Image (cartoon, coloured by chain):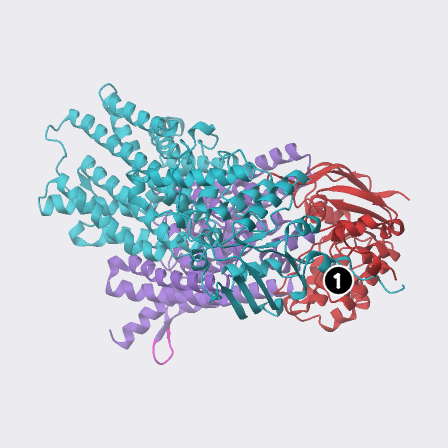
Chain colours: A cyan, B red, C purple
Amino acid sequence: MRPLTALLLFVSLIVAAASFVVPSYWLTLLIYVGINALVCVGLCVMTGSAGITSFGQAAFVGLGAYTTALLTTVLSVSPWLSLPACILVTVFMAFAIGAITVRLSGHYLVLGTFAWSIGLFYVFANVSVLGGYNGISGLPSLFKSGGVDERIYFNILVWAFVAASLLIAVNILDSRPGRAIRAVRSPAMAESFGIDSSRYKLIVFVLAAAAAGLAGWLHAHFLRFVNPNPYHLNASVEYLFMTIIGGASSLLGALAGPAIVVFAKSWLQGALPNLIKVSGNYEIVAFGAIVLLLLHFAPKGVTAVLPQSLRLYSKLNARTAASLNYATKPERGTDVLRVENVTKTFGGLRAVDNVSLRVGAGEVVALVGPNGAGKSTLFDVISGLAPVSSGEVRLLNEAIQGLPASAIARRRLARTFQHTHLRADMTVLENVAIGGHLRGSAGILHAALRLDRAEEAALLSEAARHLQRLGLAQMDEPAGTLPLGQQRIVEVARALMADPILVLLDEPAAGLRYQEKQHLASVIDDMRQAGIAVLLVEHDLDFVTQIVDRVVVLDFGTKIADGTASEVTRDQRVIEAYLGKRRAAA
Amino acid sequence: MTALLATNLLEVRYGQNLAVRGVAFQVRQGTITTVIGANGAGKTSLLAGLMGLARRSGSIVFDGHDISRNAPEHNVRRGMILVPERRELFSTMSVLDNLVLGGVANRSPKIPTTKERLEDVFAKYPRLAERRHQLAGTLSGGERQMLALGRALMGKPRLLLLDEPSLGLAPALVEEMFGWIKQLQEEGISILLIEQNALAALDIAHYAYVMSQGEFSTQGDPESLRNRDDIVARYLGKNAETRGRNA
Amino acid sequence: MNSTIALLLAQDGLTNGVIYALLAIAILLVFLVTRILLVPQGEFVVLGAITLVQLQRGQFADALWLLAALAALAIAIEAIRAWKSGRWRDLALQTAFCLTALVVAVPLVLLATGPAPLALQIAAVLCVVAPIGPMVYSIAFRDIAHSSTLTLLFAAVAVHYVLQGLMLPLFGAEGFRLEPLIQGRIDIGITRLSLQLLLVAAAFAVLVVAFWLFFRFAILGKILRATSINRIGARLVGISPDMSGLVAFGLASLTGAISGILIAPLTTVYYDSGFLLALKGFVGAVVGGLISFPVTAAGSLIVGVLESFFAFYASALKESLVFAALIPILLYKSVTHLSGRGTEEHEE
């Protein structure tokens, strides 16, 4: 078991066990920490991993609370039976709300969460069957004993749930869907490897809502009454602030944040009235001030600096003989890529002007030209990240222009990016494994229940093999710590993980030293031997001439030369394009 | 001639990446100094570092003052102005507004008024005068370059940092652009010129540095650099012929 | 629902809508220049409203305490910055600004308390509330101005809580309300227009024209526009992004103060009324795509009218309905925003 999981479970166990020894006032605080932690686990995964910031979790807590309130008071259902109902209701609403919300982008998404959060609050407060601002009281307790002992059992129950949710979160994040979830924050890259961002965002949204609904059920049966106040937008903000204080990038933050806030608030409520004679809601002011200070000096929260051993990442444990399936490659000599009269205009500018080229299986073609010649634009057009203005792109004779990047990825095109699109917070191995997303099939449920281990091992070993072949040993380092040149190599490994028939390499050698370039050259040669079609953009013409079969030269978006390396470098127009013409006599 | 700008051990970083690896160079007062090199050599990072747009370390001295911790706005007020690769014009504002904003930071009794500076810019670039009420985003590529240059001049710079001024320009306009640059130098503005178009840059420069992989591989008198085979080789690979270069 | 009622509802809605429009415009301006979603804008409005009421009632304008506290804090933080950077010019400017603000605000407030010309009281309110904007920027946002939009939003929410939290002990929990500044209605044929609406509309029109002139012709206005169009370009011509932020926040608090003055006769204002006002302002700004001022204003007017009709039909749920109406707008904006993007990255 990884150290992080052990630590999370250990903490939960300690807190549960402590129920028997701590004073009862503390028990109440610990229960609140646990209930908040449930919401924060969901927020951690949503915000920290998938980049969805929700100002609406309190509304889901309220949904769970009101559902059980209605079922247990009006319909006299047993609270234990109302639990699945709460989860169902919350999940159902989350699907409906989430389907819209996750399609919103950036600040629209955030404002969207504000919207339904307030909307639901006013529903809670104004629908008569829900009791208005007074709410519903007289909920049954969960345990028959009642009295002080009940809080002990309650605390144990809460922390059992916390432990379970932490375990599920860890399992999900350390898996194929987990990597997909974290890739969602680089949408162009995610799409290029076949990851359906909207779907994963929705799943994460629903899971976080379910955790919040569970928290609502617990909250309702702890207080034994519900009213709208704890489910106001302010409460949602509080959950978010807890997550910020704890740090959204680690699940430990989901425990640390609520703990800090709950205990600090309690202390402040006790201490402040003595310090400041005027009555008022000073914890709120202190809370806001602390968050402001945090945003200035420690924006990633208290768990920002964790030792490597406590970080959550996919580790390759055992070298396995099992490997993923490789699909067949087209025969040598077949045209894999045909670009036919492609033009791409941006506003008035023709970035790519009537360009045609072809790359065959097992052929390496370089696309060169001065800065601004249109090379990266052409890559974006071929890989589906930008639409053509006119012309056709054919992959194995199938027209692919206009298809979304994920559909093209499914047809086994893989690419690297000029400005590296790696997830800096994920390890090198994990980044490479993203490339193999389409070769795996483990879903969220499999991952949560740890049923995906065999496929994971095969995925990760193959990723490791590609990295070794490319000469990169530091697989467990966060990708952001690598020098730029090596990050490019990681992108090459990631592209190979897709088992592609066509690879687009965008300046793979930029920033590499001589030895590294030689190594890269031999890997590209391997690709040629394996029958992969390779199209690469490069500036280092020495490097290019060593490894390519043909060179295509672009200038101002037009093709000005297409031939072998030596033909092209002797071409007068090419020389002029690069070096410029001499000025006429001044 | 004194050095208007001098750096030592200048390093420029983007994230973890060291784009400029500790360089030392000078721009002498009243001259055109050029840094040429292939794409990705670090030339743009060099200018970004000088100006304060990227993280840097090392010493940067401008006109006797240490500017190594200055924000870009401060450098502009000191008289060092950058015309970046992407021009960064205010595309939904008029040509006139763009120019006026260029002069906003440097206003003092000692230098010409905004009106006078505008007249000067319009005299140099009549096409801007014709289009003064047009929105900057609707100008052609060459006109945008012109506007970017004019806007920089409105700040009355003592040192102009030019990042690939010929980028995206048709060959005839490139001629014109280098002519303007030469003219500016003749009026007393010192110039640090970054260029991929090596030959044109070497034609007008008084001193040249060749940059590669974040370092200077060669430097010296432009005339001597122009005829060296290894410069061509650096651009085109060892197999290139040098035949086409001689006038 | 007959036409009389409909027209009355519409008038009410428009009156509120104009206030929302003022809020929305201020929010949009600050967002364009600084990328900050100004959640505390509602607090500026509340400060303006309550201060006017206190002056009219002859009570001491408690907002002065807030101004003084913020001024002291701003100077202190600036001093720390100066000590760390060795640059003392900014400290001198900040001190001059804060002291001037206090020196002007205090006597004006004392003069304007109790029976005094309305114009004097309005001037006092503006002089108390307007400087608070730049001070808030300087204290809470300046040092993190380069952060992501999300971090800035969290900071804005935190500032909102601090300000709102401080306003409770300052003003207490009771409501503040004024008699309408102008009484009566005039007959225009199809309906009777309340003079209050006309006043509010007139104030709005004057402000809009003033803003338009400012951004079109004043150099400071052009500087703000330039910063909102291209931050890097602005820095490269020597415009300090801090300066733009300070001016934008100043305009926001000034507009907030004016909104407060207009809203005080219309409704009872509590120390915590600001949040909901700000959120409705956000709705308007979102309708404008967070880009267009005219559409923002129009959208806010529609929000006001919709709210008015929702309140008539389903008073309790009117807030829910207003915010629910936001969702399809957000969806529409997201879709149209995305379709033009190409390979533009949305990295976080």
Task: Say left or right for C125 vs A158.
Answer: right
- Magenta region, main secondary structure: loop
Q: Residue B66's quadrant in the figure?
A: top right
Q: Find the magenta span and give its range.
A: C186-191
Q: Does C187 appear in magenta? A: yes
Residues A156 and A113: in front is A156
Q: Position of residue C168 (x, y in %)?
A: 38, 41
C280 or A8: nearer the viewer: A8
**Can you give x and y, in whole percent of width and height, for residue B6 in the image?**
80, 40
Q: Considering the image in quadrants, where does the N terminus of chain C appear?
A: bottom left
**Chain ID, mark 1:** A
Whether C204 is among the magenta residues is no
Spot occupied by residue A143 in the image (x, y as percentages of width and height): 13, 31
The answer to which of A465 and C18 lies nearer the viewer is A465
What is the three-letter code of the residue carrying label 1?
Answer: Asp
Q: Is residue A230 left or right of residue A305?
A: left
Judge whether C251 appears above or below C9 on screen: above
Residue B245 image point, x, y percent: 84, 59
- The residue sitting at the front extreme is A332
Question: In the rendered view, does B37 fall on the left or right side of A110?
Answer: right
Can I make out residue A230 in this image?
Answer: no
Q: Is residue A3 visible?
A: yes
> Considering depth in this image, is A104 or A138 the residue closer to the camera?
A104
In the picture as drawn, the residue positioned furthest to the bottom comes out as C189
Identify the residue at horizontal 53%, vertical 42% (top origin).
A490
Above or below, B75 relative to A285? below
Q: Secondary structure at mark 1?
A: loop
Residue wearing tag 1:
A571
Residue in the image at 57% along x and 63% along y:
A358
